[in-house]
Image: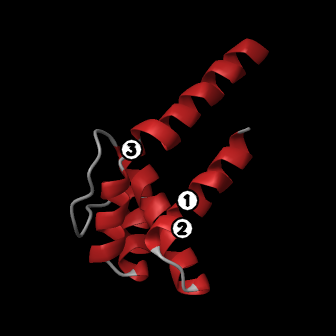
Amino acid sequence: MCEEWEAYKGELRKFYYIEMEVNVVKKLVENHTLEELKQAEQALIQDQPLAFEVFGIDLGEKLNYLIAAVQTLEKMNRSSIEFDIALNDYTKHVKETFC
């Protein structure tokens, strides 16, 4: 069980630090309001159509990008910081959650 969990954590790290396309999150943050992003997140969870296109090969990937965009934009608004810093803070939080 412990070995399986370690392998799973490794895959999570790979996704968030290597494979997550920063440009997808950046495009969402630049082109949509916080309310639009939250509505899209809820629509995806409730299996409703999205008001705009979200990159992703499946619903899980799309939801990951939406969550990252929401968290990043909230941090930008709350702390008056740039996108790169806010996204870095988000990825640090994810890493701490799973590590």
**Colour convention of the picture:** secondary structure
Q: Is residue 86 above or below residue 18?
A: below
Three-letter amino acid code at the position of disc 1: Asn
How many numbered discs sit on the rendered protein? 3
Residue 66 x, y percent position in the rendering: 41, 60
- Disc 1 crowd rating (10 Å Cα; few below 14, some 14-19, many 20+) is few
Residue 96 x, y percent position in the rendering: 73, 47
- 51 on left or right of 33: left
Q: Nearer the viewer, mark 2 or mark 3?
A: 2
| Alpha carbons under labels 1 and 2: distance apart | 5 Å
Q: Secondary structure at mark 3?
A: helix
Q: Nearer the viewer, mark 1 or mark 3?
A: 1
Q: Indicate the quadrant where residue 65 lies.
A: bottom left
Q: Earlier in the sequence, mark 2 or mark 3?
A: 3
Three-letter amino acid code at the position of disc 2: Ile
Q: Secondary structure at mark 2?
A: helix
Q: CB of mark 2 within 8 Å of CB of mark 3?
A: no
Q: What numbered label is drawn on residue 85?
A: 2
Q: CB of mark 1 within 8 Å of CB of mark 2?
A: yes
Q: Earlier in the sequence, mark 1 or mark 3?
A: 3
**Residue that mark 3 sits on:** 61
Q: Secondary structure at mark 1?
A: helix
Closer to the camera in the image, 73 or 42? 73
Q: CB of mark 1 within 8 Å of CB of mark 3?
A: no
| Alpha carbons under labels 2 and 3: distance apart | 22 Å
**Residue that mark 1 sits on:** 88
| Alpha carbons under labels 1 and 3: distance apart | 19 Å
Q: Is residue 43 above or below residue 33?
A: above
